[in-house]
Image (cartoon, rainbow, N blue to C red):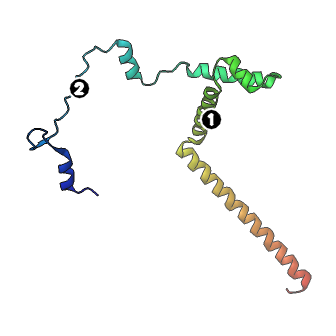
């Protein structure tokens, strides 16, 4: 294992002529780019990843594919090819639409959820009272029939 002192010795190389230790030369810095950035590449960098299809176009293509598969003998692979996209793109779009549907369904306002919870608790209380009354009546009839009362 190389220690700190060994590492310094590895960086210092003896001169061929004199035999005196000489450290390695540092590398020269690379020249900076001076070419101007075009407006198009600047807008791409600002916008991030460019998109070929809008959300509306994606939904239309997915609907076209689903209709083609449901309508006839065309396979999903053939319908995707007819729509002009790759299978990978289709499945990525489907995954993204399903995840947005799930988050939309899960995003219920807190006030509505609290109101629903209060209603459910009240109904639960009412049902428990009904059940308790029925059990008391059955218990009373059983006691009468057994002659315990």
Nearer to me, 72 or 41: 41
Label 1 neighbour load within 10 Å: few <14, some 14-19, many 20+: few
The answer to which quarter of the image holds residue 75 is top right
The answer to which quarter of the image holds residue 23 is top left
Where residue 83 sits: x, y (%)? Answer: 68, 18
Nearer to me, 4 or 97: 4
The disc placed on residue 30 is 2
Q: Is 59 displayed left or right of 50 in the figure?
A: right
What residue is drawn where x is 83% and y is 23%? 73
Residue placed under numbered mark 1 in the picture? 98
Mark 2 / mark 1, whichever is N-terminal: 2
Where residue 40 sits: x, y (%)? Answer: 38, 13
What residue is drawn where x is 59% and y is 20%? 56
Q: Is 131 displayed left or right of 113 in the figure?
A: right
Where residue 146 sits: x, y (%)? Answer: 90, 84
What residue is drawn where x is 58% and y is 47%? 113
Q: Residue furthest bottom?
A: 148
As helix, strand or loop, the secondary structure at mark 2 comes to loop
């Amino acid at each position: 294992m190389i220690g700190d002192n060994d590492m310094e010795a590895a960086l210092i190389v003896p001169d061929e002529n004199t035999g005196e230790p000489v450290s390695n030369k540092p590398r020269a810095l690379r020249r900076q780019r001076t070419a101007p950035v075009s407006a198009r590449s600047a807008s791409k960098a600002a916008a991030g990843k460019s998109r070929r299809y809008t959300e509306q176009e994606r939904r239309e293509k997915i609907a076209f594919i689903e209709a083609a598969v449901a309508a006839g003998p065309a396979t999903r692979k053939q319908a995707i090819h007819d729509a002009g996209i790759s299978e990978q793109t289709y499945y990525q779009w489907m995954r993204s639409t399903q995840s947005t549907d799930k988050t939309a369904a899960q995003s219920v306002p807190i006030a509505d959820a609290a109101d629903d919870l209060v209603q459910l608790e009240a109904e639960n209380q009412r049902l428990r009272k009904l059940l308790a009354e029925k059990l008391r009546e059955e218990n009373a009839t059983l006691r009468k029939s057994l002659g315990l009362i």
